[in-house]
Amino acid sequence: MRQALSRLAAFAFLRKSAYICAFFQQHLARRYIYNEDTLSYEAVSIPIGAQLRRLLAYTLLGVALSTAAVYLFSYFFETPRSILLHRQNDELQLKYAFLMQRFRQTDATLTELLLRDNKVYRSVFEADIIPLSVREAGMNGAGRYEQLLAAPQTKVVAEASLLMDKITKKAYVQSKSFDEVSGYAHQKEQMMLCIPSIQPLNIAHRRVRISALYGPRIDPVYHVPRFHDGIDFAGPMGTPIYATGDGVVTTASYNLHGYGNLVFVDHGFGYRTRYAHLSEIKVQRGQKVKRGQPVGLMGNTGKSTGPHLHYEVLHRQHAVNPINFFGNDVSAEEFNKIIEALSGKTEGLATDY
Ligand SMILES: [Zn+2]
């Protein structure tokens, strides 16, 4: 059956070829000229060169006409292939839009996480916050994608890549921050031992009292306004003074700038405490001390108007109010009592600058 069909096709092809040959024979190889003598058309053979020229002219005309037809057709109608391509293009655009939306959501979630990291985790552990500018640093480098961004067909790809870069950088900084925070969490126990959190002397001693608070005041020696960056405790000479947290003694000597016999303890985690005007120093430079360990005795050395202790807490080089660190041994109520009792009753009590 198949053979018969192919034979039929071959026959049809041959017939068609024969027809085309005959057509050419008729239209190209000869032409008809009217003979006025015989009053009839007579066939005249055309030379082969002219025949070829004619054939070429027909072919060119055919090509031009069919090109024009195809162009016109594709201008007004879409071919199945172009319809398919358009559809695929639309699908891709949609997928990219969806992807960009996912990227933006991820970026927003990450930003939330960064803010929480700064506000909560890093604050809890007294770590410096990492500003958003640092977390996103180097992310304005759109230069790499400049050419892609300029071309409309690649813009969407460049935008997605740019956003992905930003997310990657943020996530990297965040993961570093979490490493740091988790380190702090492991050190938390150590941190609790080190951060100053008791009073430097036994406030229950009936002759010990606070003689000057942290804050602005009139200097008792020079009588000019001056900020007092510690707390003064007045009391009997020789009252034991204690380290308020674990740490290392960094100074244990006489200070020429008014502090007299001075002990400085570095507690780590950015905290240091200063104990001034001591009559006697009980520790040495470089010595490790525990919370509650005596570092010296109350005295009247340096710029002082009587036996007292000048106590300072420093956090990252800045003096902070030591009241906020008296947590372990005094309740808020007790402390309010101390403050109330203090108002107007520090006259005549020993203080410094
Ligand atoms: Zn003082």
Image (cartoon, helix red, strand yellow):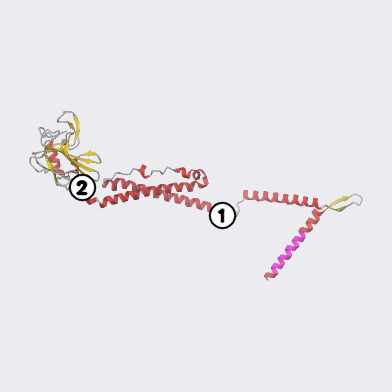
Comparing marks 1 and 2, which lies closer to the viewer? 2
**Image coordinates for residue 305, horizontal then vertical, percent:** 12, 33
The residue carrying mark 2 is 194
Figure disc tally: 2
How far from the left and from the top, in percent, is residue 6?
69, 67
Q: What stretch of residues is rendered in magenta?
A: 4-19
Within the displayed image, which quadrant is ligand 1 positioned in?
Answer: top left
**Drawn side of residue 283 relative to residue 163, left or right:** left
Of the numbered discs 1 and 2, the one sitting upstream in the chain is: 1
| Rendered residue at 61%/53% (across/down) | 79
Residue 109 makes an appearance in the image: no
The residue furthest right is 37
Residue 187 lies, with reference to residue 344, above or below; the image says below
Residue 275 lies left or right of residue 86; in this view the side is left
- Which quadrant is the C terminus positioned in? top left
Label ID, residue 84: 1
Rendering coords of residue 294 (x, y %):
13, 45
| Foreground pick, 118 / 244 | 244
Judged by its main secondary structure, the magenta piece is helix
Q: Secondary structure at mark 2?
A: helix
State whether label 1 is within 8 Å of ligand 1: no
Q: Residues within 10 Å of mark 1 (few under 14, many from 20)?
A: few
Q: Quadrant of the N terminus?
A: bottom right
Identity, as a three-letter code, of the amino acid under mark 2? Cys
